[in-house]
Image: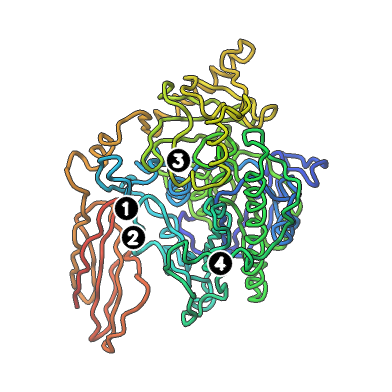
Amino acid sequence: MKRSTKFLGGVLTIFLLSLGCQTKNKDAKIDSTAVVKAELPKRPNILWLVTEDMGPYIPPFGDSTIVTPNLSRLAKEGVVYPNLFSTSGVCAPSRAAITTGMYPSSIGANHMRTTSNTEETGLPKYAAIPPLQARMVSELLRMNGYYCSNNYKEDYQFKAPVTAWDESSPYAHWHNRDKGQPFFSIFNFTETHESGLFEPYGYREIETRHYQSGDRNYKWKNYGASQAQNRMAEEDTPIHISKDTKFNIPPYLPDTELVRRDMWKLYNNIAEMDRQVGAVLKQLEDDGLLENTIIIFYGDHGGPLPREKRLIYDTGLNTPMIIRFPNQLHAGTRNDELVSFVDFAPTLLSLIGITPREYMQGQAFLGDHKAKKERKYIHAAADRFDGFTDAIRAVRDIRFKYIRNYRPNQGYYLPVEYRERIPAMQDLLRLRKEGNLDSIQAQWFRSSKDAEELFDCVADPFELHNLAKNPEHAEKLNELRTEMDRWLDAIGDEPNLPEKELIAKLWKGEKTKPITLEPTIVSSKGKITISSKTPGASLGYKIIPKSGTVPKVWTIYQEPFELPREARIVTQAHRIGFEPSEIVEGN
């Protein structure tokens, strides 16, 4: 019997293994050809627990500096994925990849940020524009009956359409869904963000938020205030780790008092994040939903320290992922396959029985529509960060990474003001000025870089020794060079295209940002039809009853519907990357 591409219910049978290269307790190999059929809920809930600026600094990934009881339990009951890679070393482009299933450099989403730094760049504000068929994956789930909530960060390099979420706010929670409705819920934890290393140190009060959300009467003390106002005094900050702990300082950072203090902050922030994750997991368990829910924990890219965030070395791209399946399926195992952020959207659809959209550039690694072959390569890109531009592309297989620098006469280090608020960064700059950095620490500050780089990421995990000119690796260099050319051509990426020309390309030569045309409401034979002349526009509407109470949630228009008697309707059209239309009213 052929499965419908539109989810209609029935038993969801997921072929979760062959989860190739999977091991249990690191030693016992599981036959990668074995296929285990597991019967999951008909429409599983999906919970994403997303932390920021997160390298593999936790026990399930080999770092026992800090205790993380909740993440360690999640790993014990789930599957650890050590080879997840973001498409960029910074958040907004990576989130664009996650929500669209497309590489940011293929849709104009890779310059960080496109709606600010206009004085430095001389460019107008603009947003990424994916193809007209593209939708945020949450909208696709909503179209298939899921309640989709996001708590609370968005940041996709474009404004989310009103159709993207049932709720996106500090109050967003699965508690607010209709009874029995399956949900896709995201909770974002920003304790581990780069700004958590700034001085004065202390968690932002909003981060210790009331996770029994759904109670919209709850009031956050300083919600909406500036970061500085939100910071608590250090003496009020929970201490999860001794300041005297001996930290494994990476070789690209000096062993100084400020660096050790920032390492202490990093691990203390991770421990606090773990506590917050535990609060959400307890709610899920208390609600009796644990065994109906697929839980996915991951970071939005690599670590927060200097020479980590924003770079496309593994320290900037590699982030831990743990997946807990209902009934602890494959508990305590490890899956070594390569996974990219562009794989998240197609995998999410695959897990609920929906065929991934053709425009998506990733592949499903789980579910009914799991790709027949595991991913062989991951790809990444770095362009502008705030007011400073570079052009770098990378491709990595399970062991080697090839980097192509399109501006070799420009150094790797970019003086991004935000990063220079980190005390460790300030120490690096001081020591550089004094001439007291060793040869490894000084690499980042070279005035130029090699046009091509090749690293053995197993033997050289910090990517310090360029093998591109080593004849022993000529075959691997040529393989990855060829793969990069194929990838760039396949996604239409022009790495050194001036940003001004990129904007002209996105706007099709127009001088101003495109605007979604207002929707048209037509009533015929007792049915309401909504349309917009902007191809690819998402259409949201609200039915306002005679009482005048306006619903909080925008419904996605999919087909003609009956309007209740004496009710009226408001509607808005929005294509991603365009300005949304005005709200139109009809009855």
Q: Residues within 10 Å of mark 3 (few under 14, many from 20)?
A: some
Q: Nearer the viewer, mark 1 or mark 3?
A: 1
Mark identifier at residue 361: 3
Instruction: Determine the residue positioned at 54% across, 48% down.
Output: 369
**Image location of residue 81, percent across then percent down:** 66, 46
Disc 2 to disc 4, how far (Cα)? 34 Å
Nearer to us in this view, 100 or 225: 225
Disc 1 to disc 2, how far (Cα)? 7 Å
Among the 4 quarters of the image, the one containing residue 361: top left
* Image quarter hosting the N terminus: bottom right
Disc 1 to disc 3, how far (Cα)? 17 Å
Mark 4, residue position: 232
Mark 1, residue position: 576
- Given the image, on which type of amino acid does mark 2 rest? Pro
Horizontal arrangement in the rendering, residue 303 relative to residue 507 (left or right): right
Disc 2, disc 4: CB below 8 Å? Answer: no
Element under disc 3: loop
